[in-house]
Image (spheres, rainbow, N blue to C red):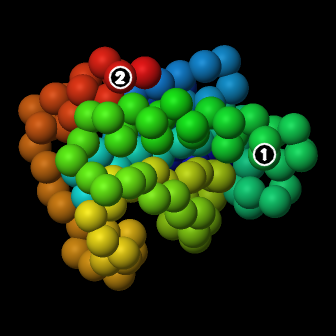
Amino acid sequence: MASIFSKIIAGEIPCHRVYEDDKHLAFLDINPLAMGHVLCVPKMEVDYMYDLTEDALADLWKFTKPVAKAIDKSMDCLRVGSAVIGLEVPHVHIHLIPLQSVEDINFSRPKLNPSKEDLADIAQRIRDHI
């Protein structure tokens, strides 16, 4: 059964895309820890990060760099943090989260619930810096 991320990649579920190449997709988390929280995923459905080949793992991390730089330029943050949890969705993904403090990357905190308009605006601001 396809993961929710595979359905997003296939266009079956809408998302706020910020960056894409032939192997990866970056899109906004719709229930972010902080405004500008982006998920970077490989288009190939793999559940566990360390089941990726060495090249695929390196490519995924390389893909995150321009996205993180664009988040840093477009959001008011001290830096962009990254996290790999891997328990929520059975599809490899890297969280890129704009940080003001270490608490901004605490996954036990309540998530935000931004409007579609706010998400669209943030996605465009990030795209403008890639």
Q: Quadrant of residue 105?
A: bottom left
Viewport quadrant of the C terminus: top left
Residue 113 relative to residue 106: left or right: left
Q: Is residue 109 above or below residue 68?
A: below
- Residue 100 in the image: x percent, y percent? 27, 64
Q: Is residue 40 above or below residue 104?
A: above
Q: Residue at x 29, y 45 (%)?
A: 36
Disc 2 marks a residue whose amino acid type is His
Disc 1 marks a residue whose amino acid type is Leu
Residue 112: in sight, yes or no? Answer: yes
Most foreground residue, 19 or 31: 19
The secondary element bearing badge 2 is classed as: loop
User: Which residue position holds label 2?
Assistant: 129
Most foreground residue, 77 or 107: 77
Q: Residue at x 36, y 75 (%)?
A: 102
Q: Quadrant of residue 23?
A: top right
Residue lying at the far bottom of the rendered structure: 108
Residue 123: in sight, yes or no? Answer: no
Q: Residue at x 30, y 71 (%)?
A: 101
Q: Residue at x 46, y 41 (%)?
A: 68
Q: Quadrant of residue 109?
A: bottom left
The secondary element bearing badge 1 is classed as: helix
- Residue 87 in the image: x percent, y percent? 58, 70
Crowdedness near tag 2: few (<14), some (14–19) or many (≥20) residues, C-alpha within 10 Å: some
- Residue 57: assigned label: 1
Residue lying at the far front of the rendered structure: 78
